[in-house]
Amino acid sequence: MEESKEQILVKRLLQKEEAAWKELFGAFSGNLTYVCSRYVSEREDVHDVLQNSFIKMFRSIESFEYRGGGSLKAWITRITVNESLKYIKQKGDFKSTVEVDDLPDLPNEEEPDFEEIPKADIMEIIRSLPDGYRTVFNLYVFEQKSHKEIALLLGIAENSSASQFHRAKGLLVQKIKEFKMSKKAQYE
């Protein structure tokens, strides 16, 4: 059975071949920047976290286990998400945004309506959420983690995760309505 391009790249990465690392960076840095920017709002910080992610990949490539096509991408994405979460925790702003008692109630059960909004604008809207809301929203929606898993990852109560997610959705509904009204006003 012939080796895939991904398997060959992994072998080259394991040998710490510089050209292989450049190839990995070239192939995945755009996607990983996008993943990281879902969690980290400042562009300069995104680049720092991405750099730390690639350093972590380089140092831990020996622990990577090839499990079929796409497993390398899944592994480097997981590292980037974990490094993003580590950054958020170290920054210290996260804890102050996850205290459930301090949050206003949002009775709104509407789902965010992302239809007809360009992807870049959606990401900006998500990026504008407070750190805690954004982090829980991303983990739940994009990483498909349960509230129990999110609570363990972030060191918060499970009900805090659910509450953060609920409030993130409420804010997204509000921000999307504002976005659509501003776009509508531009064309009138």
Image (cartoon, rainbow, N blue to C red):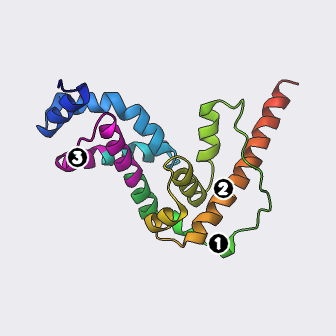
- What numbered label is drawn on residue 89? none
Q: What quarter of the picture does the C terminus occupy?
A: top right
Mark 1: amino acid: Val
Return the residue at label 1: 100
Q: Name the residue under label 2.
A: 168
Count residues near mark 2 (Cα–Cα under 10 Å), then give few for <14, some for 14-19, many for 20+.
many
Residue for point 69% across, 53% down:
169
Residue at 73% across / 40% down in the picture?
A: 113
Q: Which residues are drawn in magenta?
A: 54-82
Image coordinates for residue 90, horizontal then vertical, percent: 41, 63
Whether residue 140 is in magenta: the answer is: no
71 magenta-colored: yes
Residue 64 image label: 3
Residue 111 percent coordinates (x, y): 73, 48
Question: Reading the chain from its start, which is encountered first: label 1 or label 3?
Answer: 3
x and y percentages locating residue 28 in the rendered image: 36, 32
